Image (cartoon, helix red, strand yellow):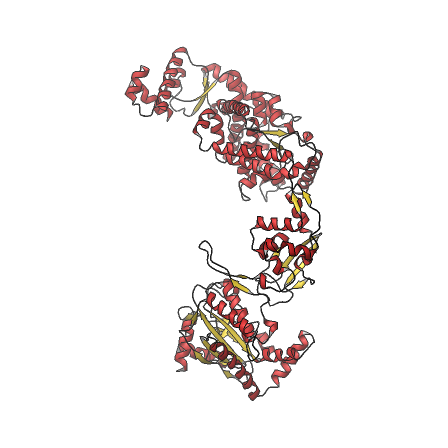
Amino acid sequence: MAYEQTRDFIQVTANNGKTNFSYIFEGNEEERLLKSKVYKSKMKYYSKEANEEFEEWNKNGYGIYFLPNGGGYKNDNITEFRAYFIDMDIKDEIEYAFVAAGFTGSPNELQEKVKSKFYSLNKTEKLNYKQIFRCRVSELKQRGIPPSAIVETKNGFHVYYLLNKDTQRHQFETLEGLLIYIYNGDMAVKNTARLLRVPDTLHLKDSNDPFTIKLEEWNRSVRYDAEDLIIRLRKVVEKVHVQTDTLLCVNSRKAPTYNTKLLSKKKGLPSRVGIDYSSMNIGNIPIISKGFEGIPELKKRLGLDNQDDLCYIDRDDIRQFLKKQNLKHLLGIDSDRLYCIFHNSSNPTSGNIYSYDDKWFYKCHSSRCGVHYNIVQIIERITRLPIHKAFDYLKELYNIAEVKTEWQLDQERLIEFNIEFLERFKYDIDLQENYPYLTKFLKTKGTLGLLIQIHEIARRKLPQLSKMRNMDSSNAIVFAPMRKVIEELLSENSDLHSINKANTKVVIMIFMYLLNCVGVDQLPDEMQRRIEQYQKESRKNSNLHYNNIARYYEIVSMDTERLILAEEMSQLFYQNHLTISNFNREQLISLCGVEEGNRVFPDRSEEEIPGLNQSISQEIKRIVNELIQVKGWTYDNEIIEHIDISDFNMKQRYKDSFKYIPKKKSDELDSLAVLDNDVGFQKWRYGFLAKKLSVNVPAIISNQEYRRARVNKLLRKQFDIPIHIKGFVYHQEISEQGKQLEDKASHILRLKQHDLSLSNAQIASLVGCSRQYVSNVLKCRD
């Protein structure tokens, strides 16, 4: 009968009847140190074969244990909370008796007295203690909470309460804390991964006096809902507090340090157990928990009822002021150390209020909680207010007024209107038709979002800017390093290519007058001091995140005149075949002149173009002119093949590119021999020259009035372009006959774009050409 009950108990408590049994050596202390390893069996059912295995381990001095909860073997890994349990031990009763009698010694002295008393007990006295434990279980059973199982151990009892499957970790921990208090249980036996003894096996810590673990009571049908059980246990605690003839809740040292209540279910979220700060009788916490209603009373306690208003422009300044307020004074707590007020703590020193660098913080040293809060977060938790209302609560408590200057309000409206206008480019068809080239640029992936993000950062910086002098006459300036701006939009894990591409887009925005680039010498003195700080950081840190720190961007009004100018510059950008990837200062100067280059790159106004780049530009210009004058057209591969820069050591430049590869030593690279037919060198040379070509060709085409076009039948016929040449070519103006044909082709494309329902035959009759010609033009377009 005992075997059948034990098997049923293990099968119901364990995972579908299977569990890992653990074997722990239980000899004297010296032997336990030598045999400290915990052995685990494979997953198995409780069976007669398992019992035989247990007997063998018992003979070797090992105790048999199992894990009621599932999901892993460590506390953090447990996900299935099948039962909560309590260990009532005679040593806990002896300790309580000494403390109740007025013992005032150290914890170590108390433990020695407990051990001495325990080892002096005879069997009758131990049975008397066990009878007290049975009476406690019986009293709780009479209050309508019977246990699911009772297992008798050598020095007490393990009491189990089975739980429903949907039990959560915080519910388990709350139940353990309540049950320890009710039963005066062992404070150590409350972790989720606790191993407990298997019935019908031996307790062998005293090998001369072994004890058989017994399953004294088993009720498999008794199972509880965690939330309901918490409420019922709390009612038991409340009733017991007003009774004198009870054995429950005798040890106030084990009482939970605060009350908990059931929070209501909101928006489909599961109900959970939270802290009822209104009943936490600690300092000013009950008053703070009232929220805004308790502010008048709290002001009187803190002596703030007659304090003058404090005016701040910058919200960060308010935060700094609040962080400097004494938390002990605010909470009404005299001690630096206390039970943590944010979880059901059993450690009287887990909570710590401390000051560091004139700022106050609250820290919990428990691994289960570990919170590290400032004043705003503390108020947010105690009042249960959203973070913005918690901030307003503290402003009202300390009589803080947040004011804004006229310049700040004006700039906020400007930025707000700009953002609303930019958002319209996503859906406003009329706006897109009025500014087609600008729309094309802004619809490039990530461009519109980047410009809006810059506006948002400028809005956040307005309070800091409003405190600076000489800002009333200018617009908001984004003075964070542009790389930080870009990383906020992308992500911390964005690669360098993505960041550089976004940075180039910002430069193009300046070129298109969507932003203004401000020189350092034009900034207020306070902002220039910030620049010096950034530069110091950049010297200490070689990270690429600190590049480009001396560039500052002014937010401009998106008025009609500026948009017209932005559309003209966008048209110039696309009609000259400029690209985002190759846009730089050198290209801009060659195309638009030095003055325009200095406008877009004011921080590089005194920088000269390197001699190498100038010589390559002249060589590319010479080759393009010669090839087009000879045959009327050319293309990229042909230009690259003809480039001759013998004065420049290409092989050394190729070797230098390897110096940035980790684990490559410079002396090894210097001795590296590069051959002319080296495949890697040929690929690098082609890529290097292709990049230089893409930078210089737009200016050459514009200055020499050449054209860039995709190869089609018209161009092949006009310039005798071979059939294997595909893609784009650069060519002279075509003849009058060719222009007429091109005009026809343009007419065909315009008709098709205007009305997609037109057939090729209808277009041919309108233009005056054959259907085959219409078909060829449309194919070339595709």
120 lies left or right of 631: right
At x 58% / y 76%, what residue is drawn?
Answer: 250
Q: Is residue 645 visible?
A: no
The front one of 777 and 69 is 69
Q: Is residue 435 above or below residue 166?
A: above
The percent coordinates of residue 410 (x first, y second) are: 61, 33
Instruction: Pick the quarter of the image with the N terminus.
Output: bottom left
Q: Residue furthest top?
A: 736
Quadrant location of the C terminus in the rendered image: top left
Q: Quadrant location of residue 17? A: bottom left
Query: Where residue 619 sits in the image (x, y, percent)?
Result: 56, 21
What residue occupies the far left of the structure in this picture? 761
Q: Is residue 116 above or below residue 270?
A: below
Above or below 130: residue 373: above
Residue 4 visible: yes
How many discs appear? Answer: 0
Judging depth in this view, the residue of 677 and 276 nearest the camera is 276
User: In the depicted view, which residue is nearer to us: 630 or 132?
Assistant: 132
Q: Vertically, is 423 above or below 4?
A: above
Q: Give coordinates of residue 236: x percent, y percent.
A: 52, 72
Residue at the image position 55 percent from the left and 86 percent from the top: 128
Residue 515, position as x, y percentages in the image = 58, 30
Location of residue 106 (image quadrant): bottom right
